[in-house]
Every structure is written in C-alpha cells, then in structure tokens.
Image (cartoon, grey):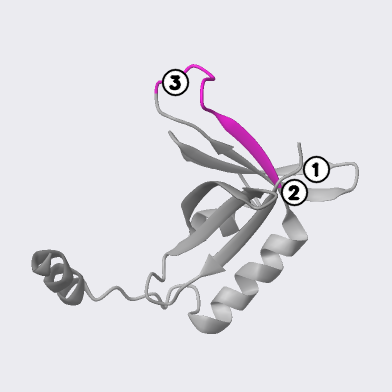
Amino acid sequence: MPLLARFSYDAEDPYAVQAAFFDGPTTLACWHFDRQMLAEGLHHPVGEGDVAFSPHTAADGDELRVSLGRCGAEDQGNAVLFVDARALAGFLEQTYAVIGPGEEFLDLDKLLDEFLAR
C-alpha cells in the first residue's frame, strides 16, 4: 500500500536522517536512520537487526528497500518499504550541502551537559 514519507535532516544531529511515514493526515511511525547507511544502501545491502537497506530494481525505476522490524519478532510488526532511489539520492545531496560526508561533528561535551541537566 502506498505511504507518504517525509525525510528531514538537522545539522544538530549530523549523522541521522529523520523519516516520518503517513497515511493521509495520520503519522504512522517516525524513525531515525543513519545517513551513511542510507547512502550505502543505494548501492549494496547494509544493516542488520531492526533496520536494513538494500538496492532494489522495480519496473518503474530503482528503489531503496527499507526493512524495519523488531529483533526476534517473527514477521510480526515488521515492514518493508520502498523509496524512489533518485529522490532519496537528491535528498542526500541536499544534506551534504549542509554538512558534507565525513565532516560530521558531534559535540559530546554539550550533549553530556544537556543530558546531565535533565
């Protein structure tokens, strides 16, 4: 069944891409994906456990196969989604304009201060 998805990127979390999945106005799920894994998944299978990506060729073009699940769940609660590869590659290029691949930096001192302030 077709779903709408919104991918977003925030330089404050430079390693992650956020993905929200919708059925009409209803948000079904929100996931955070590793940006590098998404990019690699366009070319070869990556990931294990809850999240895995792999290239997939469909009749109407190349796609990224996204497998989501729970460790140990035997097909219950698992989902397989397909994302247009060209659209995803374009999105990733936009994220690289914000922070280039390999230029990510996470201020661990700031993160620890925020964590301890809670």
Q: Secondary structure at mark 1?
A: strand
Depth order, front residue of 26/53: 26
**Any magenta on residue 94?**
no
x then y, percent, for residue 75: 54, 20
Do we see residue 45 in this rendering? no
Residue 74 higher or lower than 118, as above or below: above
Residue 36 relative to residue 63: left or right: left
Residue underneath mark 3: 73
Depth order, front residue of 84/45: 84
Residue 51 higher or lower than 114, as above or below: above
The C terminus lies in quadrant: bottom left
**Residue beneath the point at 15% across and 65% down:** 115
Dots 3 and 1: beta carbons under 8 Å? no
**Residue beneath the point at 15% across and 75% down:** 109
Do we see residue 32 in this rendering? yes
x then y, percent, for residue 39: 58, 59
Q: Which residues are magenta?
A: 72-82
